[in-house]
Image (cartoon, helix red, strand yellow):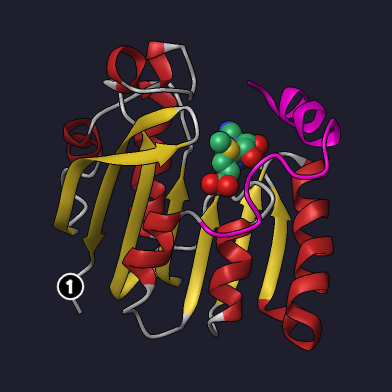
Amino acid sequence: MDSSAWDARYAATDLVWSATPNAVVARETADLPPGRALDLAAGEGRNAIWLASRGWRVTAVDFSAVATRRIRELADDRLGPETGRVCAVTADLMAWTPDPASADLVVLAYLQLVAGERRPAHRAAAAALAPGGTLLLVAHHSDNLSYGVGGPQDPGVLFTPADVEADLDGTALVLERAERVDRVVPTGVALDVLVRAHRPA
Ligand SMILES: C[S@@+](CC[C@H](N)C(=O)[O-])C[C@H]1O[C@@H](n2cnc3c(N)ncnc32)[C@H](O)[C@@H]1O
C-alpha cells in the first residue's frame, strides 16, 4: 500500500489500531530507562504516545499525513502538557533516514515491506541506535498466512526472524531475541515476528 492508500484507510475511520500500545512493545520496553525513541511507521501513534507517557521523547514517523495528524491530535488529548514529548514527522522511510546514533530506542511495529525495501529500512533503523540503544521489531510472520489470522495476505511483505537477522548482518547489533510469537486476537491467534537487539555501549 502506498501513502495515499494508507491515508484513505486512516481517513475512513476514527481509529484503525487500538488506543493502547501493542502488548509486546509495552512488555519489551517496560524495563528500559526513558530516553530518545524513534517509532518508525508509527501509524496513529499508539506506541509512541504510550512511550511518551512513560517519559520518552519520541519522534514518530509515518508516510501517511492523515496518520501523523492523528498522532498530533491524540498526543494533545492523552498527554496534555507533556504533548511536546512526541514529534510527528510525515516522511517516507524509503527516502528519509534517521540520524545515525541518535536514538536510545527504535521501534518498528508492523512495517511490512518487500525484501528490497525492508533490508535498507531495517539497516537504517539499526544505524539510528546510539551505543546502548535497543531495537524492538514486531511484524506479521510469514507463517501467519497459513497458520495465523489477519494481517497482510501478500507473502512478499511477510518475513521471519531469520530474515531480520540477515537484514541486520554486519550492523554490530547484539541479538537478544529473534523468534515467532503468538498474538491472541478476537478471531484467533496471529503469528508475529519479535526481534529485540541492542548496540553495545
Ligand atoms: C500496520 S500499520 C502499523 C502502525 C503502527 N506501527 C502500529 O503498530 O500501530 C503500518 C504503517 O506503516 C506505514 N508505512 C508503510 N510504508 C511506509 C513507508 N515507506 N514510510 C513510512 N511509513 C510507512 C503506514 O502508513 C502505516 O501507518
The three-letter amino acid code for the residue at tag 1 is Pro
Can you say which quadrant of the picture contains the C terminus? bottom left
The secondary structure type at the circle numbered 1 is loop
Is residue 95 something one can see in this rendering?
no
Determine if the C-beta at disc 1 is less than 8 A from ligand 1. Answer: no
Looking at the picture, how far across and down is residue 173, in whole percent?
Answer: 19, 58
Quarter of image, ligand 1 = top right
Q: Which residues are magenta?
A: 1-21
Quarter-wise, where is residue 132 in the image?
A: bottom left
Q: Residue at x 44, y 49 (%)?
A: 108
Quarter-wise, where is residue 181 in the image?
A: top left
Q: Nearer the viewer, residue 62 or 169?
A: 62
Is residue 102 something one can see in this rendering?
yes
Asked if residue 152 lies left or right of residue 65, the reply is left
Q: Which residue is mark 1?
A: 200
User: Is 4 contained in the magenta span?
Assistant: yes
Can you say which quadrant of the picture contains the N terminus? top right
Asked if residue 5 lies left or right of residue 122, the reply is right
Vertical arrangement, residue 186 with respect to residue 158, above or below: below
Looking at the picture, how far across and down is residue 165, in whole percent?
Answer: 18, 40
Q: Residue at x 78, y 25 (%)?
A: 4
Q: Nearer the viewer, residue 176 or 168?
A: 176
Looking at the picture, how far across and down is residue 183, in whole percent?
Answer: 36, 41
